[in-house]
């Protein structure tokens, strides 16, 4: 027993184990990226949470055991920043955010960094978490500005997206080869229902045990209507979509955006791409149509 304890306390053994901390940094970075560009769809929520908490707990124990080693100290300074990014991109999904935040806080406070450095960096991180979280919440809730929305506006050939995943329908229409899917979003806008259809690149999905990250970043809108109606969507083939009487190919849908196509227009207070959307139907249009019918009847 004494030999085992002596071996576990050996500085070279602890140094070797401490390099495993970088695996957790990589794992957390992948979760941040997937939470940003994908929609998390769980197959078994309870099982997924047990496994997710278990992974965070195991790495937390390993890093606490090697908290004085330089690799662990480096990771202890990186993990809180990744946890902050995860909070921003997954704001509201606290079951994803809390475990890494707890691990990051424990490891940061217990690592071999000097107390003065801990005080300064801890204060800065706390301000970043509180102020950053509050500012992001206000911007996304009241102004509709999210990190995803900003990124789609900055990156070239990425269509501007302001998607509310809570309005997402899981009744997907997938191509036979499974590479593309048509997804419907139904949202209440003022006094009318807005239905949006997006084509997503399903071959970029990432699967984990009991959960799948459905790739949504880079998806393209093919139809937005300001009212409910049957648009009869269906895949004619693996690269051809029929929707609302139009035939669209994958090449056309994901073609690079031109300057004219990248400009946003407004229809029923919804952003509608200029290429493939239905014409806006407004109250003024309906009145104009009624007057035209009345004039025609009078002329007859």
Image (cartoon, rainbow, N blue to C red):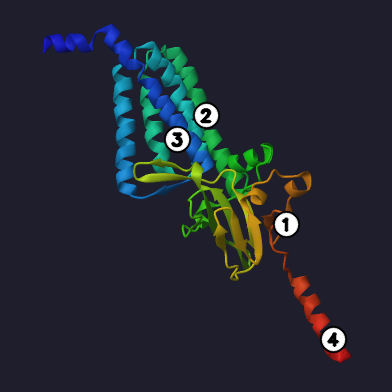
Dividing the picture into quarters, in which one does residue 19 lie?
top left
Q: Mark 2 to mark 3: distance in Å?
A: 23 Å
Q: Residue at x 52, y 52 (%)?
A: 165
Q: Mark 2 to mark 4: distance in Å?
A: 68 Å
* Mark 1 lies on residue: 266
* Mark 3 lies on residue: 31
Eye-nearest disc, 2 or 4 = 4
Q: Is residue 229 left or right of residue 109?
A: right
Query: Which of the two labelled residues, at mark 3 and mark 4, occupies the earlier sequence position?
Result: 3
Query: Which of the two labelled residues, at mark 2 and mark 3, occupies the earlier sequence position?
Result: 3
Percent of width and height locating residue 268: 69, 62
Q: Is residue 200 left or right of residue 104?
A: right
Q: Mark 1 to mark 2: distance in Å?
A: 38 Å
Percent of width and height locating residue 195: 59, 62
* Mark 2 lies on residue: 127
* Mark 4 lies on residue: 296
Q: Mark 4 to mark 1: distance in Å?
A: 31 Å
Disc 4, SS: helix
In the rendered structure, are the residues bearing label 1 and label 2 in contact, judged by CB atoms less than 8 Å apart?
no
In the rendered structure, are the residues bearing label 2 and label 3 in contact, judged by CB atoms less than 8 Å apart?
no
Query: Which of the two labelled residues, at mark 2 and mark 4, occupies the earlier sequence position?
Result: 2
Quarter placement of the N terminus: top left
Query: Which of the two labelled residues, at mark 1 and mark 2, occupies the earlier sequence position?
Result: 2
In the rendered structure, are the residues bearing label 1 and label 3 in contact, judged by CB atoms less than 8 Å apart?
no
Mark 2 neighbour class, 10 Å CA radius: few under 14, some 14 to 19, many 20 or more: few
Q: Residue at x 67, y 51 (%)?
A: 252
Taking the image as drawn, is residue 91 in sight?
Answer: no
Q: Residue at x 47, y 60 (%)?
A: 171
Mark 1 neighbour class, 10 Å CA radius: few under 14, some 14 to 19, many 20 or more: few
Mark 4 neighbour class, 10 Å CA radius: few under 14, some 14 to 19, many 20 or more: few
Disc 2, SS: helix
């Amino acid at each position: 027993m004494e030999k085992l304890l002596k071996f576990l306390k050996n500085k070279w053994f602890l140094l070797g184990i401490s390099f495993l901390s970088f695996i957790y940094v990589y794992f957390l970075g992948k979760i941040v990226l997937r939470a940003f560009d994908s929609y998390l769809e769980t197959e078994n929520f309870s099982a997924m949470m047990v496994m997710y908490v278990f992974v965070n707990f195991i790495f937390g124990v390993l890093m606490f055991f090697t908290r004085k080693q330089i690799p662990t100290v480096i990771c202890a300074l990186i993990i809180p920043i990744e946890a902050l990014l995860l909070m921003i991109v997954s704001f509201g999904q606290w079951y994803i955010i809390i475990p890494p935040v707890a691990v990051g806080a424990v490891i940061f406070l217990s690592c071999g960094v000097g107390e003065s450095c801990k005080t300064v960096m801890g204060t800065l991180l706390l301000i970043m978490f509180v102020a950053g979280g509050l500012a992001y919440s206000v911007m996304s809730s009241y102004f509709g500005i999210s990190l995803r929305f900003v990124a789609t506006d900055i990156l070239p050939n990425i269509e501007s997206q302001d998607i509310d995943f809570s309005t997402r329908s899981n009744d997907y229409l997938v191509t036979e080869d499974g590479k593309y899917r048509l997804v419907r979003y139904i949202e209440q806008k003022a006094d009318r229902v807005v239905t949006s259809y997006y084509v997503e690149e399903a071959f970029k999905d990432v699967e984990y045990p009991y959960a799948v990250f459905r790739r949504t970043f880079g998806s393209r809108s093919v139809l937005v209507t300001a009212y409910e109606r049957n648009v009869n969507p269906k895949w004619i083939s693996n690269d051809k979509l029929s929707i609302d009487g139009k035939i669209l190919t994958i090449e056309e849908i994901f073609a690079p955006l031109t300057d004219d196509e990248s400009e946003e227009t407004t229809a029923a207070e919804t952003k509608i791409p200029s290429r493939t959307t239905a014409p806006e139907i407004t109250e003024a249009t309906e009145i104009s149509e009624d007057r035209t019918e009345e004039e025609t009847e009078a002329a007859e």
